Amino acid sequence: MNATVKPPVRREAMRIAGKLVTTDEMVEVRNPYDNSVVGLIPAARPEHVREAFAQAKAFKPKLTRYERQQILQKTAELLRDRKELFAKLITAEAGLCWKDSLYEASRAYDVWSFAAQLTIKDDGEMFSCDISPNGKARKIFTTRQPLLGVISAITPFNHPLNMVSHKLAPAIATNNRLVLKPTELTPLTALALADVLYEAGLPPEMLSVVTGNPSTMGDAMITDPDADLVTFTGSVRVGKHIANTAGYKRIVLELGGNDPLIVMEDADLDKAAELAVTGATKNSGQRCTAVKRILVVESVADAFSKLVVEKAKKLKCGDPRDPETDVGTVINARSASLFQARVDDAVSKGAEVLYGKRAEGALFHPTVVDKIPYSCELVHEETFGPVIPIIRVPNDIAEVIRISNSTAYGLSSGICTNRYDYIQRFVAELEVGTVNLWEVPGYRIEMSPFGGIKDSGLGYKEGVVEAMKSFTNVKTWSMPWTA
């Protein structure tokens, strides 16, 4: 199967505790490539959000670890068996190319499978108390319990399946209840995932999915009195609004990135160029961990930029449904126009476009831009598209680190060097959450900790292990214990 056949328009309903709920006002979901309507979703109002939270709060999950493990693993297997069906949905609503959509669907299997495995692992700790003259013959034990209230989960457009999975799987693994609000741009995949979870045996009261946008539902997802924790992945602007609005709630904010790939003078330039092009263009460059800036030292910059252009020219950009396409669309034409304006601005400040085409609707072709001033908006802000931006920097590691740290973001980084003294300094001094040696900034597994500092995030990191911690309360208890 591939995505060349258009799916029918899906007229969807919200899932509130498993019940299908519609509204008179509907929101169109459009295919970014041809602007056709691929779905219609309800425009939730605050009362729908309130109902979802109230029903979730009234339900007290009593699933054993074994039962949770079975639901999570069954979900993983259903996603694996329906990988191409989910990939078609992702391509239709997000404009991601077929290759990227298939990859996303396969990643989701890992999230659910890892969560299933971790569910059966006891997460308690034990502390001996006879470790000082002030101690006693006792032991202290900890156990993790689900939150008293409900988790409010808000997800973005760039990973319609995997980002949602990273909210839902750890929550279900820890016996929590959720209300999910996927972005109105790509909600169809999330609704299909909810149906898979119900099919796998999840009590429907544990998961509701509300749809629409803030114009009709306002801040209900952030301010509901039954929400114990708000977990959000998306823009810095919205993340800071949530932080200012949520009140006395826990918040986990996974925000933007402006991730550098740093190429030093000793690097294998062909390998570095491959990482640069792949890291900047996969998922149409719409990853918070995509390569957003390539800092290459002057002594190798000419040779490196030629290799980058050679590799960029091999990419096919076009119809996302074509299995041969390497780069599909960005999320909409408005975003493509913004990226084009930023490229034009950089050129006006001395940068050179070595390869690329003008934006065409939501198609933004891989564009190699060299000699960019590091303070240009193109590389100083997060440009969420397949630009391949080269910044030439002095052959001075201290200056490289200073320029890398000069933005408000601090998510991830990739390093191309074999010098151990350089590696030590990059790990110690780069203001980021992740440093990957000879890999793209976005490299991780679904279980490992993931998150940033500065404007890139607040609260617990993501990754299944860290999310399971953040979605629980720790209860401590002790008892007499003689040796």
Image (tube, grey):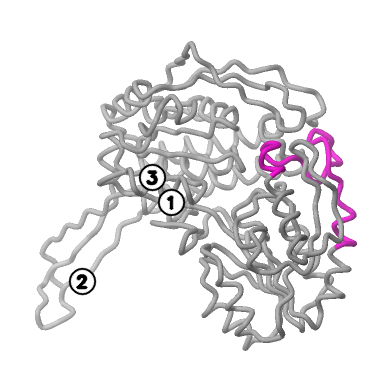
Q: Earlier in the sequence, mark 2 or mark 1?
A: 2
* Name of the residue lying farthest toward the front: 348
Q: Can residue 207 be seen in this snapshot?
A: yes
Q: CA distance from mark 3 to mark 2?
A: 41 Å
Q: Secondary structure at mark 2?
A: strand
Q: Amino acid at mark 3?
A: Ile
Up the image or down, 149 lies above or below 124; here it is above
Name the residue at 57% across, 83% down. Answer: 425
Residue 253 is labelled as 1
Q: Earlier in the sequence, mark 1 or mark 3?
A: 3
Q: Secondary structure at mark 3?
A: helix
Q: Main secondary structure of the magenta part?
A: loop
Q: Residues within 10 Å of mark 1 (few under 14, many from 20)?
A: many
Residue 347: percent from left, percent from top:
77, 60
Q: Nearer the viewer, mark 1 or mark 3?
A: 3
Depth check, front residue: 247 or 210 = 247
Up the image or down, 133 lies above or below 54; here it is below
Q: CA distance from mark 2 to mark 1?
A: 35 Å
Q: Which residue is mark 2?
A: 128
Q: Amino acid at mark 2?
A: Ser
Q: 362 left or right of 461? A: right
Q: Are marks 1 and 3 in contact (CB under 8 Å)?
A: yes
Asked if residue 465 is among those painted magenta in the image, a careful observer would answer: no
Q: Which residue is mark 3?
A: 242
Depth check, front residue: 248 or 376 = 376
Residue 455: percent from left, percent from top:
47, 59
Q: Quadrant of residue 280?
A: bottom right
Depth check, front residue: 10 or 371 = 371
Q: Residues within 10 Å of mark 3 (few under 14, many from 20)?
A: many
Q: Can residue 83 be seen in this snapshot?
A: no
* Name of the residue lying farthest toward the bottom: 421
Q: Which residues are magenta?
A: 309-337
